[in-house]
Every structure is written in structure tokens, then in C-alpha cells.
Amino acid sequence: MQIIEKTVKKSLAFAAVLGLSTFSAFASDIRVGMVLEPPHLDPTAGAAAAIDEVVYANVFEGLTRIDQNGAVQPSLATSWTISNDGTTYTFNLKQGVSFHDGTSFDADDVLFTFERARAEDSTNAQKGIFAPITSVTAIDPATVEIKIAQPQGDFLFNIGRGDAVIVAPESAEKNQSNPVGTGPFKFVRWDQGSRVILEKNADYTGTPAHMNKATFVFISDPNAAQNAMLAGDVDGFANFPAPESLAIFEADPRYQVVRGSTEGETILSTNNAKAPFDDVRVRKAIAHALDRQAIIDGAMFGYGTPIGTHFAPHHPYYEDLLGTHPRDIEGAKALLAEAGYPEGFKATFKLPPPTYARRGGQIIAAQLREIGIELELINVEWGQWLEDVFKTKNYDLSIVSHVEPFDIGIYANPGYYFQYDNVVFQAIIEKLNVTADEAKREQLARAAQRILAEDAVNGYLFQLAKTGVWNANLEGMWPNSPVEGNDLTAVRWTN
């Protein structure tokens, strides 16, 4: 406590010297800090949440959008009707809309987007969103009909995510480096390794943004993030990477510190297809060795909620499965011996840049060492993680937060990077995807959670907290993250 108090006093003295320089130099501009730099800027062709954190609802729009409360709102579709049997959606499109390059938006762009996402060679990270679709028809330039095989309770939510934003055939292939959407901000420039700059779209047909310019600044180091905030180099972080420094900003009236929730299940990612992790006894041994609260306290300074399976605790379908594999060092050793590893084994542990991974990795390594598992810690940059772990599956263990909402269905894909293959689980998810009745959906979701916990598919650690820090004169920043994104449309300066 004394250390924190001294740090607060020093920081306040430093800030007093800086004076007005800690505030944005331009009342119509905003500079948002981010931990991870996106690998590219096309949300329909990549899994990295950092892509959506820059362009979702800012540059690109979908037929629907998700608001800060997680509710579905109209976007490029102004309204829609659903057939009595729940399988036909008719969308009425906004008219007079243009993409940022001047090409017009109409039903053909919707058709192109959905057919591209559904194609066999699609690189869409959430291709499953489009799997239920049987046809997409442009009835006329302002009307689109989408048919799905069976009723789906979350269809409108799913097409409001970043993976389903509407792109144009004229610009789609260049969106990774030069994103062209219909949103309230236009892409200006990407200084790789540093920042992405957006500017207000003067031709936007919706509610215009308050800011004339938005700059996303990439700062992965927690100390550098703290210094950037105090120096006024950035106006805020939607998710601040240095939880140990929050007291500094809470004690300073020039800043807001907002604690919210995310959809981020933070997991000890495990390569289920690679020995020895293909043995459920080994995975259970690891689960018994984990002390979640120690990881939360050590890596996140107490910010985070323990989880026992891949599901958000704030969701109404959540089932508390923390007791499935309680901490039990002797029990873990016995399971390893039974699996043929009485002396333990060695493995690699690839850690991406976020604080929870780098700091959490050291704590987890110490915990697994207690049962004889020696881990080689390998720090990797985000692009390398996406290539080595997510794409080519060249890893033993890793840590990552899965921030997609209601994403338990990823475990039904044996080709997904942790390569879990369970036909019973797959059947449950297949049924869940076509079930609209809420009571039945909850029953299926809970059954799916129990299977993942029992199989110890991954080490389930904690739900990532959202600790936002931003200038006290800013309003409109989202306190929670129901989807990946930093929607800046309503953000403005009050002074």
C-alpha cells in the first residue's frame, strides 16, 4: 500500500507539472490507446479482435449492429421482417448510402458479402455464422431476402458482428490494407508499428460522429501505456494494460477509471492433438494444478472472475463448474503417473504480448512445475502468435482471451487451433445452433459447458475484466465490451 501511495503522489506531482498538456490538443480529435496492433484491417478475413477494435462500427457497418448493452440495432438495414416459421428474413436497406470510395451501396453488396463469406475458400474467421444460410436474394436494390435452414435465435446478433460487415466487390480485396466501408469514419493512414488514423466521413447518412479525427495508437508495454496516459500522448485506453497502475488514475480527477465486463474467456490454450496433451489425464492433471485466483491476483491485480469452462459468468446460461477440477497437486501427480509421466515432462509455452499472457504465463509455469511439468516460456508478437499458434497449430500451450460473444461453438470444429474432436459435443452444438426455444437453448448450452469442463479441453482461467482509463472530459466510451470493437460514434469532449 505504501508503494502505491508513493507512486500516486509522484505521478500527481508529474501531472501537475504537465498541466494542460495532458489533455487532447484538439477538441475534435481523439487518440485511443490499444495494446495489440491488428495484423490487417479487414474484419471479414481475420480472427484478431484488434481488427474490430479499430474498424467495427467506425469504418465498417453490417445489416445490424450491436450496441453497448449487447442489443441488436438497425444499421445498413433500417428494418426487417421474419417469416412465421423463423426461416426467412427480409431486410429493408438504407438508401442513399455510399462507400468511402464513392461507390454506391445496395442489395448487390449484401449478396456479394454473404456469398463471399459462405464460399468454400472463405477466410472468414467466423464462417459458422453463415453456415445456416441457404440462400441470399436481392429482391430489388433496397431489399434483401435471407433464408436459413432452421430457426436461429441469435441470427440477427450474429450478422451484427464484425465478421458480417458489408463490403463492396470494388474494394473488398484491398480492405486488409485500405479498408473501405460505409461507416462514420474513413480510413486515412496506417503507420505500421505505430498507429491507424481515421477521419470523419462528411457524407455519412447516419448520426454523424462528434470527432473529426480518431487515431488508434498501439502501445503493448504496460509502463509505456501508463506514461503515455500521464503525458497526454493518448486520451484513453478502452482496456488499460496495467491494472497495477489504476490507483494512480483513480486518485487523479483528470481521469476516469471504469470497470466493466468483457466476453473474454482467458484460457490456457492446449493443443489437444499433440502428445502428451491428447491424453485427457494429462489435461486433467494440468487443470488440478492451476490456482486461478493466484493467476488473477498476480497477473491482473485482482481484476477478473474465475471460470471453470468456456462461458461468460454474466451470461444467463452460465453454469458454475469451478469445482470440476479443484486444485489438487497430489491428485495431479497421480494422473500424470497414470498417463505414463511419473517424472513429468517438458513443453513449450508461447506467450503473446498482453499483460495477462506474459505475467500469467510465469505464474502458470510455476504452478505446473509443482507437478513436474517444465515449461519453456517463449514470448511472441501478435502476428507471430496468429501464424504459429492459431493458423499452423505449432505450439504446446499458450494463453489467450477469446473475446467473441457466445463462442462455445468453436469447440465443435476439430480444425480449430486447439484441435478438440468430440462427436457428442459437436452434436449438441449442431442442435443448439438450430434451436430457438430459450429453455431448450439453455439446457443445451449448459450440457456443452459440462463436457468441456470434464474433458479439461483447455485450462479455464478467468473472465477478462474491462478496465477502461480515459480523460475525465470524454464521454461516450463503452464501459463494457459485448462485442469486439471501440465504437467511437458517440464519443465526444464535454469541455
Image (spheres, rainbow, N blue to C red):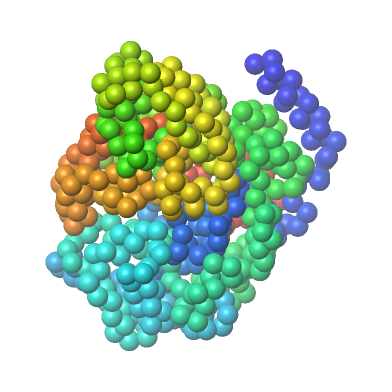
Q: Residue at x 48, y 28 (%)?
A: 375
Q: Position of residue 224 (x, y in %)?
A: 71, 39
Asked whether, in this view, residue 340 is left or right of residue 258, the answer is left
Between residue 349 and residue 297, name the one nearer to us: 349
Q: Position of residue 170 (x, y in %)?
A: 50, 82
Seen in the picture, residue 330 relative to 42 is either above or below; the reply is: above
Asked whether, in this view, residue 397 is left or right of residue 115, the answer is right
Asked whether, in this view, residue 257 is left or right of residue 234, the answer is left
Seen in the picture, residue 102 relative to 204 is either above or below; the reply is: below
Is any atom of residue 162 visible in this view?
yes
Q: Residue at x 34, y 75 (%)?
A: 115
Between residue 404 and residue 107, name the one nearer to us: 404
Between residue 30 and residue 28, name the one nearer to us: 30
Dividing the picture into quadrants, the one containing residue 147 is bottom left
Q: Position of residue 300 (x, y in %)?
A: 53, 29
Q: From this viewpoint, which residue is outermost toward the right? A: 17
Dividing the picture into quadrants, the one containing residue 193 is bottom right
Q: Residue at x 67, y 66 (%)?
A: 189
